[in-house]
Amino acid sequence: MDAEVFHSLKNLAQGVAPLADLFHADPSRSEWLTVDACGIHADFSRQRINTTLYEALLHAADVADIHGSFKKMMAGDIMNVTEDRAVGHLALRAPATSSPLAQQAAGQLGRARQLADNIRSGAVNGATGKSFTTVINIGIGGSDLGPAMATRALRRFANGPVVKFVSNIDGADLDEALHGAQPESTLFVVSSKTFTTLETMHNAERARHWIQARVPDWSQHFVAATAHAEAALNWGIQKDHCLEFFDWVGGRFSLSSVIGFPMMCSIGGDQFSDFIAGMAEMDNHVVTAPANVNIPMMHALIWWMNSALHSFSTVAVIPYSHDLSRLPAYLQQLVMESNGKSVGTDGRSVLGGTSPVVWGEAGTNGQHAFFQMLHQGTQIVPVEFVTTASSLGTDDEAHDLLFANVIAQSEALAAGRVHAEPHKTFEGNRPSSVLVLDELNPRGLGSLIAMYEHSAVIQGWLMGVNSFDQWGVELGKVLAVDAASAIAGGSQSDTKTMTHPLLNWYISIRKKLSRKQ
Ligand code: F6P
């Protein structure tokens, strides 16, 4: 974005009157700042926006040619320039006939759905003939967070094997998943785009030993979801258990690929298709709806305004839905890995803040933990309430109370309270949005997740960063390999680094501990 335009937007943002004055001056603001589409009611009226800033933001989106960028992305242009890759996650849910990429994707998704349904029906069983009652996904980052979040969110639709997720290299994670599981009836899904990730390959190796101890014909108990089929086949995955996605699908954008396989095992192929239909509906909305009634566009402009123009460094995403409790963790990767950058696509420093720190916890639990700070702390933290119109559990009265709390918290943040005693004063003017899903079902969840995918990408385009690379995670991976080989070698290092005293201390303490065992 042009520096002059950026600074004029920043001045406009900082000149916006307090929310109380805005509501007083224009009682209709909730009409033009609320958008209903794709089963989502999005209320942005308690964000620090007046009509001038609103028009200016919409104009900025127009100048940034967001629509044109989506078109290029869908045409298969190299949008991920630093990795020289196309960005094709929209093709994963487009009709098979719409492009060669969509056709490739549909073929693999069809194979995955069929395999999941065969596992669920007992047409595909373990090597000893027992049906699979436990499915354990081994993967990390985009190969874990999306399917783990979605499987939990749709747990009321689960009618297949128990599905668990293991991601951490800490052995305690796999230990917990194996507790109570039987090798004869357990299926592992090794989910890894690259099929090289240290954590995943280490855990997969351990899982293989665990199966092999009781079932020599172990390969019947493994499925791979990967973009590197050759590596998976070399590892020993059977050809018909090797589900593929593609170089042109980023890990954090891969939930609608075969990375969704654990979800398919849990809810079945048809329900997964509904999830994909919800995503496709949102994909169509983002490219066809005018900007002022386009939920991902409005959402992105607001998140960008808060981080880049107001320099609010964090955003709290609070699902008022127990089943959506993994949403903040999923969004951390989607938003922070995509946009946590300081240089633009052109290699130059960006203007203004980029990704906010995304964090959160299910409401109402969060109210009794950190909301004190949100209401009266010295930092302004924009809050995003995500909830559902229809009740999820069996207690409708509880759902009314849950929703009442969303309203109460939004009101308290925005309006505040004047009080004679300073410690009972709420200054208000604290921004928040409310996103209400009609229903937390596969279609609704698909629509919500595609909305967040598009918003993250649009924010990246507004910032001028490449939302599709993640060079910032590479250095740590390389250094971990060096540190692991030093620990395995057991000899003290004399290379002077900032951490070699800690490494040497660990090597000596490990020796002492292993002598004791
Ligand atoms: O942490 C970096 C990262 O490359 C993520 O982008 C990715 O989702 C994750 O690691 C897992 O990678 P893979 O699916 O290749 O195992």
Image (cartoon, rainbow, N blue to C red):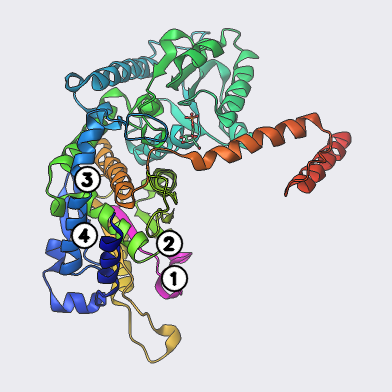
* Closer to viewer: mark 2 or mark 4: 4
Choose between 216 and 465: the one closer to the eye.
Answer: 465
Q: Is residue 384 magenta?
A: yes
How far apart, in angstroms, are the residues tagged by discs 4 and 3? 12 Å
Do tag 3 and tag 1 residues touch (Cβ < 8 Å)?
no
Q: Residues within 10 Å of mark 1 (few under 14, many from 20)?
A: few
How far apart, in angstroms, are the residues tagged by discs 1 and 2? 9 Å
Label 3 beta carbon less than 8 Å to ligand 1: no
Do tag 1 and tag 4 residues touch (Cβ < 8 Å)?
no
* Closer to viewer: mark 3 or mark 1: 3
Q: Quadrant of the C terminus?
A: top right
Choose between 92 and 341: the one closer to the eye.
Answer: 341
Residue 173: where, in percent of width, then height?
59, 36
How far apart, in angstroms, are the residues tagged by discs 3 and 2? 24 Å
Do tag 4 and tag 3 residues touch (Cβ < 8 Å)?
no
Boundaries of the magenta span: 367-388
Residue 261: where, in percent of width, then height?
38, 25
Circle 4 residue: 57
Residue 461: where, in percent of width, then height?
30, 47
Badge number at residue 313: 2
* Closer to viewer: mark 1 or mark 2: 2
